[in-house]
Image: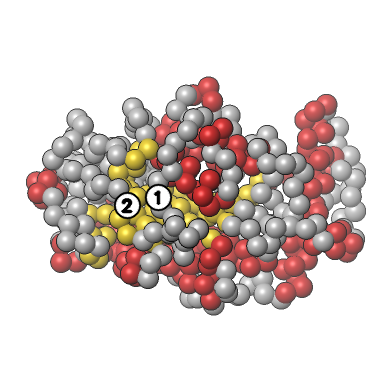
């Protein structure tokens, strides 16, 4: 998979003038992108979020017994029902539930869970449990199945400062990584490079040519609209995640045909002093997500977008001696948008019936992927996931 950095390093393979003529932008705009297609936005909650203090089973006697220092006061929780409540910092997501725009899938994980951040994230991103099958990501595999070439902009865009996530790796998948709208206005050097040969050089050349058309077309749309800086109808919090989501909203409004957007939020590895750290992160997630969905609703685009937020694993049921929690297994997963069935989905994990101190998984994460692929993006899931998985009913029947 070619990342933005790889693209920029090898862009000299194609002899292009520093100022790409306007007709290239016109060609890109006329490429026939599917501007009304459904869109999936993925938020990666990196570090292993403590699901027990996120979707809190305050009605379970095991909660108070296992957590003394980091137990949350039930009166402060955002009640979902008489047994479960959201963390106090998640009031904005509580409003999404009330408005019918947020589903909480409970007890999500996979068989024989791995407590390594790196390995578990590989599993989630590739949708494969076997280490020899992680060469591509689940989104990359999905797009690899579709007819080629495809019109419009990239199939997927990652908004962030890190390398392109494995989730988006594919053999015939156009995926880009950007940090701001400035990355769309590329200036390519004149000349040819001696680096790269054979199939690699051909792949890079093809990638550059496709990316020039889509990137300059998108940049032209930005410049032409005059709304690159402040198009949001909703007030976004001043947080890193909210900035990422606001940029994604701008890209969706431009209608470039991209089907998947990806953002990440780090620092959920709360081995010590968990309370303030997790409160800040969940406030960022909750506020950013609601602002994003409100923005799209004001623009008349909310019926086209579904958001999934996940973490690579949950935390242990019992707190540790540092007022934190250690790596665990199953955790809740969030799916948001106008199309979702709101509220709790699946059985709330028991804090009494444990597997060696960990929550028991009740829903395989690949069942969630199956629903998003088959029922939302309308892409066959069996080849992507390496088998048939019964989709979780997270979307409304009318979808």
Q: Where is residue 250 drawn, in percent x and y?
A: 61, 67
Q: Which residue is mark 1?
A: 393
- Left or right of 197: which side holds 279? left
Q: Could you tell me which quadrant the N terminus lies in?
A: top right
Q: Is residue 207 visible?
A: yes
Q: Are marks 2 and 1 in contact (CB under 8 Å)?
A: yes
Q: Nearer the viewer, residue 6 or 255?
A: 255
Q: Residue furthest front?
A: 398
Above or below, 226 relative to 290: below
The colour scheme is secondary structure
- Left or right of 135: which side holds 372? left
Above or below, 14 relative to 92: above
Q: CA distance from mark 2 to mark 1?
A: 8 Å
In the rendered image, which quarter is residue 356 located in?
A: top left
Picture disc at residue 345: 2
Crowding near pointer 1: few (<14 within 10 Å), some, many (20+)? some
Q: Residue furthest top?
A: 132
Crowding near pointer 2: few (<14 within 10 Å), some, many (20+)? some
Q: Where is residue 119 drawn, in percent x and y?
A: 43, 31
Q: Which residue is at 28% across, 42% downward?
A: 315
Above or below, 76 relative to 348: below
Above or below, 227 relative to 39: below
Q: Which residue is at 49% across, 67% downward?
A: 292
In the rendered image, which quarter is residue 133 located in?
A: top right
Q: Is residue 163 visible?
A: no
Which is closer to the viewer, label 2 or label 1?
A: 1
- Left or right of 83: which side holds 240? right
């Amino acid at each position: 998979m070619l990342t933005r950095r790889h693209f920029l390093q090898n862009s000299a393979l194609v002899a292009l003038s520093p100022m790409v003529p306007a007709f290239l932008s016109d060609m890109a705009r006329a490429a026939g992108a599917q501007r009304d297609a459904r869109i999936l936005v993925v938020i990666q909650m990196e570090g292993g979020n403590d699901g027990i203090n996120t979707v809190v089973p305050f009605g379970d006697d095991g909660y108070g017994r296992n957590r003394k220092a980091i137990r949350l006061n039930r009166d402060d929780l955002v009640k979902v029902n008489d047994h479960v409540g959201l963390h106090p910092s998640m009031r904005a997501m509580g409003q999404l539930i009330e408005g019918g725009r947020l589903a909480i899938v409970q007890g999500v994980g996979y068989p024989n869970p791995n407590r390594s951040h790196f390995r578990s994230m590989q599993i989630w991103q590739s949708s494969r449990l076997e280490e020899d099958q992680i060469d591509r990501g689940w989104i990359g595999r999905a797009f690899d199945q579709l007819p080629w070439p495809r019109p419009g902009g990239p199939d997927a865009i990652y908004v962030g400062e890190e390398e392109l996530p494995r989730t988006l790796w594919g053999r015939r998948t156009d995926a880009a990584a950007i940090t701001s709208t400035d990355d769309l206005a590329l200036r390519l050097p004149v000349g040819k490079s001696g680096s790269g040969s054979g199939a690699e050089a051909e792949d890079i050349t093809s990638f550059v040519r496709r990316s020039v058309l889509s990137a300059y077309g998108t940049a032209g749309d930005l410049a032409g609209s005059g709304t690159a800086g402040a198009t949001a109808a909703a007030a976004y919090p001043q947080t890193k995640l909210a900035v990422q989501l606001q940029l994604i909203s701008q890209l969706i409004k431009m209608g470039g045909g991209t089907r998947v957007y990806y953002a990440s939020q780090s620092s959920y590895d709360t081995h010590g002093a968990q309370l303030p750290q997790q409160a800040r992160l969940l406030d960022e997630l909750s506020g950013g997500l609601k602002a994003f969905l409100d923005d799209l609703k004001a623009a008349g685009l909310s019926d086209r977008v579904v958001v999934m937020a996940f973490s690579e694993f949950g935390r242990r049921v019992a707190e540790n001696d540092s007022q934190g929690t250690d790596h665990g297994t199953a955790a809740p997963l969030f799916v948001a948008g106008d199309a979702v069935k709101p509220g709790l989905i699946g059985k709330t994990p028991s804090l009494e019936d444990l597997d060696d101190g960990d929550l028991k998984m009740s829903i395989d994460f690949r069942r969630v992927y199956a629903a998003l692929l088959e029922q939302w993006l309308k892409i066959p899931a069996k080849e992507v996931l390496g088998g048939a998985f019964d989709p979780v009913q997270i979307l409304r029947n009318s979808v």
